Amino acid sequence: GRAHTFTGQYMKQTQLVTHGVYAITRNPLYFGVFQCEFGAVVWAAHQGPVLLPQAYPYWLCVLAAALVYAVAFNWTMALREARELERCFGDAYRRYRAAVPFLVPFLKLPQEIL
């Protein structure tokens, strides 16, 4: 929303943004990052044997390890941000959380996972 900017400036009175892309996923940035990571894996799995036939298994393992790290890091950051939003906005965020999926639009995960 308008509360924070890329310049580091912020509004004194923040508000919870629940419209636009935030109406279909609580974490649109992380959803986009996961899509990019998935695309990289698909590309590497498809093109790797052609580009690097002898080294393919090694690089596939390196890519898998990097992907596991990236997914774990992003998931942890999204959960940390959710806790901070709940602390700041209380019941308003809890209602929003109950209505909007965590990451993937139109996919509701059980709250125990989050």
Image (cartoon, helix red, strand yellow):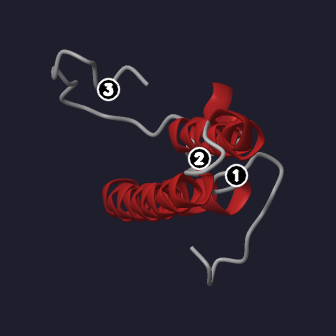
Count of numbered labels shown in the rendering? 3
- Considering only order in the chain, which callout, 2 or 1, is on the residue closer to the N terminus? 2
Q: In the shown orientation, is residue 41 left or right of residue 78?
A: right
- Which element carries disc 2, helix, strand or loop? loop
- Residue at the far front in the pictured view: 54
Mark 1 → mark 2, Cα distance in angstroms: 6 Å
Q: Look at discs 3 and 2 and give the one toward the viewer.
A: 2
Q: Between residues 66 and 98, which one lies in front from this camera angle?
A: 66
**Residue for badge 3:** 3
Give me the disc on residue 49: none
State left or right for residue 113 relative to residue 93: right
Q: Quadrant of the N terminus?
A: top left
Q: Is residue 95 visible?
A: yes
- Badge 2 amino acid: Arg
Q: Earlier in the sequence, mark 1 or mark 3?
A: 3
Which residue is labeled 1 in the image?
Answer: 100
